[in-house]
Amino acid sequence: MVFIAACGGGGGGDGGTGGGGGSDQTQSSDSGNNNSENDGAGSDTEGNSGTGDSVGGSGDATDSGITSPQGYAYPVVVSLWSDDVAFGEGRIIDDTIAFSGTAQPRHTIEFWLNDVMNGSTVADSNGDWRLDFSLISLSPGDYTIDLVSIAPNGDRVASQRPFAFRYDPTAPASPIVEAISDDSYIAGDGYTSDGSLVIDGTAEPSMNVTLYLNGIAIGNSVADSDGVWSVDYTVVDLADGSYMLTADATFLDLQSATSPQFPLVVDRQAPVAPANLLIFNDSGASNSDLITNDNTLLFSGVTEPFARVRLRRDAQVMGSAQADAAGNWVFDYSAVTIQDGVYGITLEATDRAGNQSLVSSAFTLIMDTVAPDPVTSMGLQPDTGVVGDGVTSTGAVQIFGTAQPEESVELFLDGASAGVVTVDANGDWLLDLTSTPLSNGTYAITTQTIDIAGNRSALSGDTIITISGTIPATPVITGVTSDSGLASDGITADNTLFIQGTAGVGIDVVVYLDTVEQGTASTDLNGDWVLDLTATTLSDGAYVITAMAEDGSGLQSGISSDFNLLIDTTAPLAPAIISFTTDTGALGDQVTSDSTLVFSGSAEANASIELFIDAGSIGTTTADGSGNWSFDHTGTTLADGSYAITAVASDLSGNTSATSSALNITVDTAAPAAPAVTAITDDTGTAGDGITSDNQLIFSGTAEANASVEVFVDAGSIGTTTADGSGNWSYDHTGNTLADGGYAITAIATDSSGNTSTTSNVFSVIVVTSGLAAPIVTAISVDTGTPSDGITSDNQLVISGTAEANASVEVFIDAGSIGTTTADGSGNWSFDHTGTTLADGSYAITAVASDLSGNTSATSSALNITVDTATPAAPAVMAITDDTGTAGDGITSDNQLIFSGTAEANASVEVFVDAGSIGTTTADGSGNWSYDHTGTTLADGSYAITAVATDSSGNGSAISNALNITVDAAAPVAPTVMAITDDTGTAGDGITSDNQLIISGTAEPNTSVEVFIGGGSIGITAADGSGNWSYDHTGTTLADGGYAITATATDSSGNTSTPSSVLNVIVVTSGLAAPIVTAISVDTGIPLDGITSDNQLVISGTAEANASVEVFIDAGSIGTTTADGSGNWSYDHTG
């Protein structure tokens, strides 16, 4: 609540109108305010001064000490209360307000809002009063309050001046960030070299403006009456960088939208001095040498974007130009005519922030508008006939002369430019027209010199030349003979050649080899010509052949196009056949089982390779640029046999190499026969039975002659040997000592082509170097539960194992013999002990083997077993997770559960829901188990959870007792808050004078009900079996006021309902305020003076809303009426 001190009759704004108290008396203006009031209750005869604001706000509260003519204190508004009020602005932004003030003690105070009576109150014994307008909704606008104080005898005193205020809840407009100071150099662009800034802007007048830098508040300012605000941020020196300034405006709790962004760049870095300069028009041969004959110039260059470039000529400022976003700038200096001479142009850049670069190095500008001297001499070549007469028989001429070095000369034939040439350092120049011979005729030649600034001399006088004769056509070289290799490619192995071509009929053709004349040939009637050079043997190498035609009068054609000739008489080296694919077997032995081959090798780069098998050509391939070649012959399947592969290379000139050396290969695709393992050395005892006491053996056998033989013991390779030419092989394994036992010896043969045989038959070997090997007890049957763990619930067993083949095996339990059996030929044995029932317990089973000779083995290792026929105790299903609501009651809102319990230690526990198996888990060493069923969502309902345990012997327990659970995921219905006790006055209206209450209602039967007042929990109670509940809150005394009472219900599964509907309760424990008699009807004459000529009256007033009002005249009751919901009442006494 915000408080504003105000007076009851503060003056209106200058020229404004205040509100009266309801009478027709005229109130004169107070001192300093010439306001005419038509509704005032009386004049301010004391001359007290009020101070008004722009909306007719309150003045100083000086009327509180002034009395009316009747001797009563004037009613005065002292304070205006609101949730939000602007101090000194006369404006509120919230429509819930209250007034307080002073008046004559015990007087009734009427409130007139914009000339409409809107309530009343009674001043207390001190004359203080308060009226709450919190239930009045105001529309935005200007308002005035007038007061009328009514004495018990009916005297009425109106306030001297109205109390004025404005209600305006509109948020202020967004402020604008407009400028920074110092905004160095270009004002308003937001670029500055000053990091200590003052930021200015505009907003609505009197608004509080908050300034933000990159979203962080950095200061506040209050806009002045013109809306101007400023934030001094000079205490901070911002680092170089880019920033964003924004602002917003607030008025009390109202806040504007954020202002548009103001980009700010702090930049103290000087730009780089400009490094290039161009001019328009930079005349002459170069457009960038700054030498020109244009003395009205435009300068241009590149610098930092948006920088301003200052130009100086010989230290004198010429002006400046602004660079664009790309840094390009142009300076127009065309209004100044620059005199001929040499100048130094310097540049200096100033960036947007005002930082200045260093001055650039000077650019040399040469201004030259003086025309050069003309050509000093000129001549013609060849000048046939009389030298110097300007008449020649050929149009393929060169014109030459002299001029100043480094100038250019442009020649004109009959006024048309024939070309521009450059004068060399010696002053000589030459224009070559031989490639474009002139036609017969007379020509006027003129010249003009051009200096490096582009200035031109005057045209020279005409020099007359005459071309007399028909120039023959340029000849064509068509080829050489013979052009070996690829025809017409100009590459040949023939070095004694005929050169041939075409030209005009009857023309002599001069032929040149690398510009050296080789001879002349004449054309025949068809224009064909041939020059015989066979008498000359040309060296190997590259040549350029050209030709020129000459007619009988000496006129010559231009030089023909080049004909490129390469002579190569050197035969290439014989190619090499390096390999073939796939060379199976031993790599590089040229013996293979692959009959579809690819041959590869090397030769002269780019040579053509022809391949031969046994001297028969099989095809051609080409070597690459590195000389590597490959020929794919996989499309042909070679029969088994031996072959000689050769090749011949031919180069581009057609030279052929000698035949390569042969690559001799053998194709062998037939697998060898399986070898045979025939003997061991030493085979002690009976020869050939494979039983030996020698455990360091040599294995031998037969195979395909010269085959590689790999030997295996029990399928594991022990090494490789080679059969001799007769096919006999032997493998020495004496370096390895074989343990006693049986072994399977096999072998595989691989021939030289890599073909592999099938595996040989097994040669069985038994090594016995000592007494019999101890047998092995391997298993019992049936081994229930976990296989091979030796724990079983079967007490009538079959015992099995292994021993030496055919040995006699005696079996023992706990060292006591239980019988004898015999191992079969593979050494496997079995003893049936099912005729004996073993008691539960642990046993050690061993065995001893004996051979036919009576040799006895050592005792085997024991097979330890446990016989367990006792069923485990039934497991217990003890809990679910989560068991929401009351723990342990089995009722839950969680439909994705984990079940847990106990069982025999390490037992396997199978879990059932309603007798249906859902899975298996294992108890730990302490017997605790848990089964995660959260992957399944149970529907709401009741379930019986049971379990069965199986011990390690496979014995299964009885079914456990059921854990009965209920899944209830549905939230209960929202409860109802129905009543309070005591609900005094009108039952059920929620209005009571009892401030220690019992709250009651209904909910889902047996649910827990949590009760809330104003959203805050006050406690929990329980609904009974019928759903009725009651919460005793009598231990808490509620203050007078309104309360919203709600409740939520939580069922036994922990599901919570939505909140109930609100039961609104109003606690009123104070006595009723005295009603007010405000008027009679009809009050004839002066309104509100209580004097009337009407003797049948209707009496009206105000009281507490809906109160019963008894009316008295001179202390005598005349009847009763009821105030309406707004507290207004009327009693008809006209009867």
Image: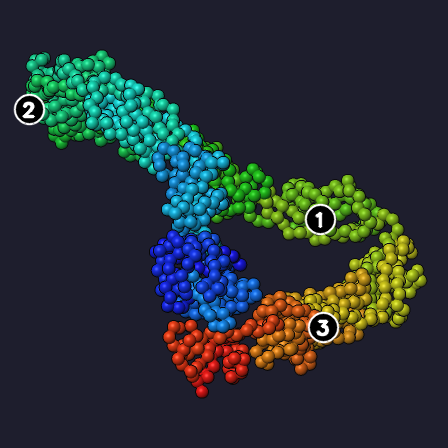
The numbered dot on residue 109 is none
Pick the front one: 23 or 116: 23
Q: Which residue is mark 3?
A: 890
- The residue to which callout 2 is attached is 441
Marks 3 and 1 sit apart, C-alpha to C-alpha, by: 64 Å
User: Between 937 and 320, which is closer to the camera in this rendering?
Assistant: 320
Mark 3 and mark 1 lie on one chain; the one further toward the N terminus is 1
Tell which circle, 2 or 3, labels the residue nearer the N-terminal end.
2
User: Measured from the top left, where is residue 74 in percent x and y?
Assistant: 47, 62
Which of discs 2 and 3 lies nearer the camera? The answer is 3
Residue extending furthest toward the right: 816
Asked if the residue under mark 2 is in contact with the one under mark 1, i.e. CB atoms within 8 Å, the reply is no
* Picture residue at 72% right of the left edge, 72% below the top: 890
Residue at the disc numbered 1? 716
Residue 54 lies, in percent from the top left, at 39, 54
Residue at x 12%, y 28% (from the top left corner): 505
Residue type at numbered disc 2: Gly
Q: Amino acid at mark 1?
A: Gly
